[in-house]
Amino acid sequence: MLESMLKWVKAAQMTEEEGFAERSVNVGGMVVTLPPQVFECLAPETWKVIGVIILLVSLVLFQVVAFFVFFFVRDAVANAVKRLKGSQQGEGDGAEPHAVKTMVVLGSGGHTAEMLRVVKFLDLNKYKPRVYVVSQTDGMSAERALRFEREQRTSMEGENRPGSKMKEGKALPKVVNIPRSREVGQSYVTSVFTTSYSLFASVATVFREMPMLLLCNGPGTCLPVCLSLKLLRPWSSKIVFVESICRTRSLSLTGKIIYHLRVADTIFVQWPELCHAYPRTTYSGRVF
């Protein structure tokens, strides 16, 4: 260590004696002084480009870290306030269970039918309010979701068990449209741009709704929504992905992405053979 320092000092003295002076590079308005040996490797213009790239990457990393810290603190404060309110209210007789705001992503055709059947078996008094997300080019899923909610409301209002009756005049759950990330038959090259556009729209939707639970299945529409929720609420939300019943031997493209990126907290498959190929999935039976 000492020998290395002495060699460095000796080399600096020799450089100074030979008449080489330190040179400066202007990077983003900051003057960075570098020893002359550095400029023997690369030209000053190249060092400027490298410095700008490092500066931009550092700013992006700082913003990402600040982003996560902000939402982590916000969720922690919100959870503390909820616990405080719950302790002040006390247990009470017949108290309503803690509501979980739920976002449901509907695909088209069979995907919508499967997801609505999953929602049908939920405790609708607990998993509320519900927000349905459909693609802009899917005109059927929004109508089916609203019809499903009307049927469930009529069914629950007709039952006489305690706590099952919904409040009269309460508005139906919200249906939100987002751009479709990839159309059927669309090339993978152009789908990069449409997925990016859908991601921005999904971030805005998730930021506005802030669900605690996300339910989704096969279609690519759910991928930007999952990524947005994982980005905005990485610790205080849960993502449940239900693979389509038609996937018997391998996951769908969306399922593979979610599986390998570990986006979802739980991935349900409807065939036990898939659990052997994908160990982190869960088999609990079939939707139909």
Image: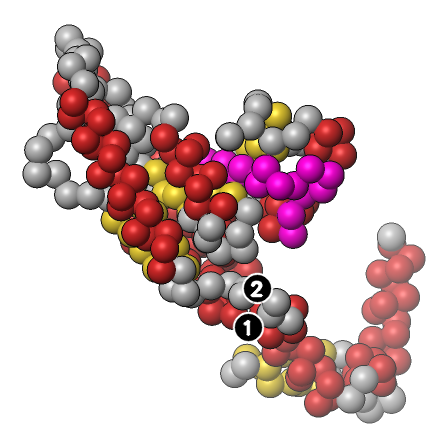
Residue 164's image quarter? top left
* Front-lying residue, 285 or 194: 285
Q: Name which residue type carries label 2.
A: Val
Q: Which mark is residue 193?
A: 1
Query: Is residue 233 in sight in this rendering?
Result: no
Q: Relative to 259, does residue 181 appear above or below in the rendering?
A: below
Q: CA distance from mark 1 to mark 2?
A: 15 Å
SS at mark 1 in the image? helix
Instruction: Give yes or no for residue 285 being in the magenta stretch.
Output: no
Q: Which residues are magenta?
A: 233-253
Residue 194 seen: yes
| Residue 244 included in the magenta stretch of the image | yes
Are the residues flagged by discs 1 and 2 in contact, CB closer than 8 Å? no
Residue furthest left in the image: 169
Residue 23 in percent (x, y) is at 71, 86
Choose between 142 and 178: the one closer to the eye. Answer: 142
Left or right placement of residue 240 versus residue 262 in this view? left
Q: Return the residue at label 2.
A: 184
Q: Nearer the viewer, residue 275 or 228?
A: 275
Most common secondary structure along the magenta stretch: loop
Sequence-earlier tag: 1 or 2? 2
Q: Position of residue 37 (x, y in %)?
A: 83, 80
User: Which residue is at a point 85% across and 85% down the rendered structure image?
Assistant: 40
Callout 2 secondary element: loop
127 over 14 or under it: above or below: above
Provide residue 226's location: percent of width, then percent of height: 49, 48
Give the quadrant of residue 267: top right
Name the residue at 60% across, 85% down. 26
Picture residue at 87% right of the left edge, 63% below the top: 6
Residue 105 lies, in percent from the top left, at 42, 47
